[in-house]
Image (spheres, rainbow, N blue to C red):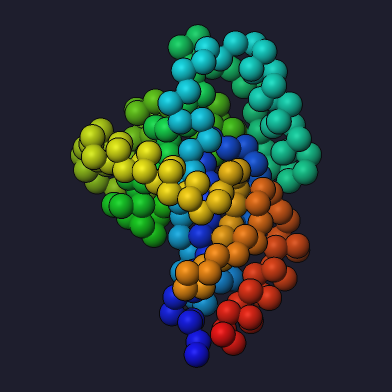
Amino acid sequence: MSHHATRSLVYVTDPMCSWCWGFSPVIEVVREQYQDQCPIQLLVGGLRPGNTERFDQYRRKTILEHWRAVHERTGQPFNFAFQMGSAFTYDTEPAARAVCVMRRLESSQAFQYLKNIHEAFYVANRDVTQEAVLLDLAKMQEVDQEKFLQLLQDADLKKQIWEEFEYVRTLGVNGFPTLLALNGEESTVLTDGYQSLDVLVPLIETWLNVSASQ
């Protein structure tokens, strides 16, 4: 018996995860090639949600080292002159919540919005922890601004995003990016961390062939 109807790919990410920005071109091609064969879900996992640590020069240096490593491996652009104001904290919850809002308002645009946040943070050096920036990025996709802001500030949605972080952990995801393959209740990890397209595609093809025959 085929479980084709219950098959899906689940992309677990964070909009302020540099390796996820590095993986952005890969997941874009994966979506183009496979979204007609199985649904591709987007979940946010929570990299540093609720973080309140002051972003000092030591943390800036450490983060730039990570960014250089991602750039060297993936070729994705970064602004290495990265500076943030003294009030900046690397709290990833607001951006993750904004992705959740976009997913609810315009589910087909959620991946593009994720990419917009990545690019704004890593290339344009914009503070995507700020509501005004997240709203401005949403304007690029012509969603209802009033509804977007209302949901972004909604107490129930704030609760739901933390529940999503917890749900991701029940799936066994501890890092980002992660791509899971679901067939009914059976879960397969296709990649835990960055992986190139030429390595990932054969894994997806094998899973599709095996799951189709079950």
Q: Residue at horizontal 46%, vertical 55%?
A: 42
Using the image as rendered, state which of residue 70 and residue 4 is in the foreground: 4
In percent of width and height, residue 104 lies at 30, 52
Q: Residue at horizontal 48%, vertical 64%?
A: 40
The reply, left or right, for residue 114 in relation to residue 150 is right
| Quadrant location of the C terminus in the rendered image | bottom right
Q: Is residue 109 above or below residue 113?
A: below
Q: Residue at horizontal 69%, vertical 21%?
A: 62
In percent of width and height, residue 116 lies at 48, 42
Using the image as rendered, state which of residue 91 and residue 33 is in the foreground: 91
- Give the residue at the far right of this rendering: 72
In percent of width and height, residue 93 lies at 42, 33
The answer to whether residue 112 of the structure is visible from this angle is no
In percent of width and height, residue 195 lies at 71, 54
Q: Residue at horizontal 67%, vertical 38%?
A: 77
Q: Is residue 13 above or below residue 184?
A: above
- Give the residue at the far bottom of this rendering: 1
The reply, left or right, for residue 180 in relation to residue 137 is right
The reply, left or right, for residue 33 in relation to residue 64 is left
The answer to whether residue 96 of the structure is visible from this angle is yes
The reply, left or right, for residue 191 in relation to residue 183 is right
Residue 159 position by quadrant: top left
